[in-house]
Image: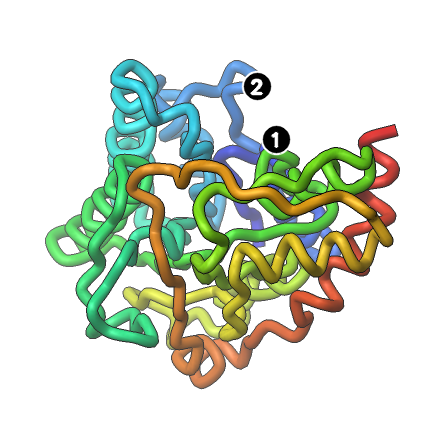
Amino acid sequence: MKILVTGGKGALGARLIEKLHELGHEAISYDIADGQDLFEVKALEEAVKGVDVVYHLAAEANLNTMRDIEGAHRGSVLNILGTENVAYACAKYHKWLIYISTMCVYGDTIEHPEREDTTLPNPSEIYATSKYAGEWVVIGYGKSLDLPYTILRIATPYGKGTRLAMAVHVFFQQALKGEAITILGDGSNERTMTYVDDVMEGTVAPLSHKDAAQKQIFNISTAERTTVLQMAQSVKAVTGSQSEIVFMPKRPNDTFKEDADVSKAKKILGWEAKVSFAEGVKRTLPWIKEVIQ
């Protein structure tokens, strides 16, 4: 198939394009880094018109840049209105839209584990709220204008090529430099950190199950829960570091517990995460060493 990837020059977008090429698809990037703007609707329409599938990854995905008023505004406009433009173009030309959302939309929920079709999301901050709003834009086009869509709620990916600013990668950098490993809060927050290779397999899985994946939401996540303290301890162990683990004031509005039900993706897409966190940090170490030299 011919597949357009918005945000194709980003960390995940670039990996996705590589993966799609490996599978024999023609993958094309649409990215602001190349002057391709989601708000130039006519150009976006032309790009969408010539493909079979659109993966929409382009977003403000860094929570830290959305913690002040201006950053929150810029990120929300991109994540909501940018998604609306993509959904509009895909609906207009009846192209399959695969929207990359996030497990962050769940926030702190009453129900555990978090199920795609029954758990009521409770986003903890503006980034997750904007991504959840994007989901409803896509669903709305699906309901009213028969847009073919699939929504993937992806867990935080780590490993080669992903963002260095994520906690586990910061822990690696601190440990390898002999600095204190700093945890925000008491370290009891639970995360479903998912190795990037597993995320990529889950992201392309709908392509092999087109009919079954239509108008569905899937958790693309490991079922394994790891506390932030366990993350730091694992990094310290795998690096052989003597760094002290220290605790800092917790970040406001941080989700306390991620707990994904992944049975739907396994049943319908035949996908489940395979790499444990312990194995994932071992695989991540050589890459981290290379990039911080």
Q: Position of residue 191 (x, y in %)?
A: 48, 60
- Is residue 92 among what the camera can see? no
Residue 172 figure quarter: top right
Q: What kind of colouring is applied to the model shown?
A: rainbow
Quadrant that contains the C terminus: top right
Q: Secondary structure at mark 2?
A: helix
Query: Height in image: 71 above or below 175?
Result: above
Can you name the residue that lies furthest to the left here? 144
What residue is rendered at 58% in x and 52% in y? 157
The answer to whether residue 233 is left or right of residue 250 is right
Q: Position of residue 166 (x, y in %)?
A: 57, 40
| Residue denoted by label 2 | 33
7 or 163: which is nearer to us?
Answer: 163
What residue is rendered at 46% in x and 51% in y? 186
Q: Secondary structure at mark 1?
A: loop
Quadrant that contains the N terminus: bottom right
Query: Height in image: 204 above or below 209?
Result: above
Identified by mark 1, the residue type is Lys
| Residue denoted by label 1 | 9
